[in-house]
Amino acid sequence: MNSAVLWTLVNVLPLLGVSGVGADEESVFVKEGDSVTLYTNIEANQQGKMRWYFNDIQIAKITVDQREICSEDECKERFRDRLKLDHQTGSLIITNTRNTDTGDFRRKVINTGSVSDKIFNVSVHGVSAAERDQMKRKSVKEGESITLDPGVVKNPNVVKMWYFNDIPIAEITGDQCKVCTDDECKERFRDRLKLDHQTGSLTIMNIRNTDSGDYKLEITSSSFSISRILTVLTVNAVLDSGLSPAAVAGIVTVVVLLIAAAAAVFLYLKARRKIEYYIEHWIHTEQS
């Protein structure tokens, strides 16, 4: 191949957005706050020169001995340390996604004169402040049940995995559902997990203190993966008294007063016995 043509393929065409083959496109739907990884599916020794673009803005560059993210001010301003590169594969990781991340992420690989494109059409679904707070922390009373809803998952042909503090507890693959396949999960939850195959939601029944922790949903396909932390579950132990909070507070106040009165009586009797002892001792001394 003529050296001038090769130079054009490697240096000019990528800047013009021209590819040696038709670009492969895939849609990715995420919820605001998710982390998403866009896979390259290219072996390290076949990566050559790789570029990542967001709506034609270069956001990452990979060569044999170099990894560079957000070298341009526009990229730094938009993503602010929310981009990472997988060192082995060159896959792009976008953390804490925002509405402004909606757009086309293009992976361009230039290898021995050929150019290949992959475009990820990423759509970020916004959430309200109240929904975001609920996802971060949710309080449940001991003995109740709670359903963790993943929301609408539009991406087809994906595997959904639930984790509790990084322990896998449930999986949906096609028509197959699995819950607690390992001993650690079985020991902890003991038939208290229920998985909805249609929605992907996870229900935890008869909540216990030991169920407090991080519940994470991983949505994975051959081209991308999405990580979603739905809730940090705090379990509050309660007494099954049927009393209102005001009544419980009144009972607590009365108990505290009774304890204080009992302590006062105890101290009074102790002081009285001490005084009586000294009087008896003085009388005995005088009589002697």
Image: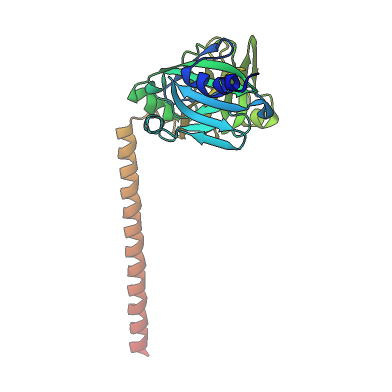
221 vs 109, nearest the viewer:
109
Residue at x 36%, y 73% (from the top left corner): 274
Please state, as top left, top right, bottom left or bottom right, where the N terminus lies in the image: top right
Q: Is residue 279 above or below residue 45?
A: below
Q: Is residue 4 left or right of residue 147?
A: right
Task: Give x and y (percent) for residue 149.
Answer: 48, 18
Extreme residue in the bottom direction: 288
Q: Is residue 8 visible?
A: yes
Q: Is residue 88 above or below residue 114?
A: below
Colouring method of the image: rainbow
69 vs 132, nearest the viewer:
69
Task: Give x and y (percent) for residue 215.
Answer: 52, 28
Q: Quadrant of residue 102?
A: top left
Q: Quadrant of residue 277?
A: bottom left
Task: Give x and y (percent) for residue 67.
Answer: 55, 35
Task: Give x and y (percent) for residue 150.
Answer: 49, 18
212 vs 54, nearest the viewer:
54
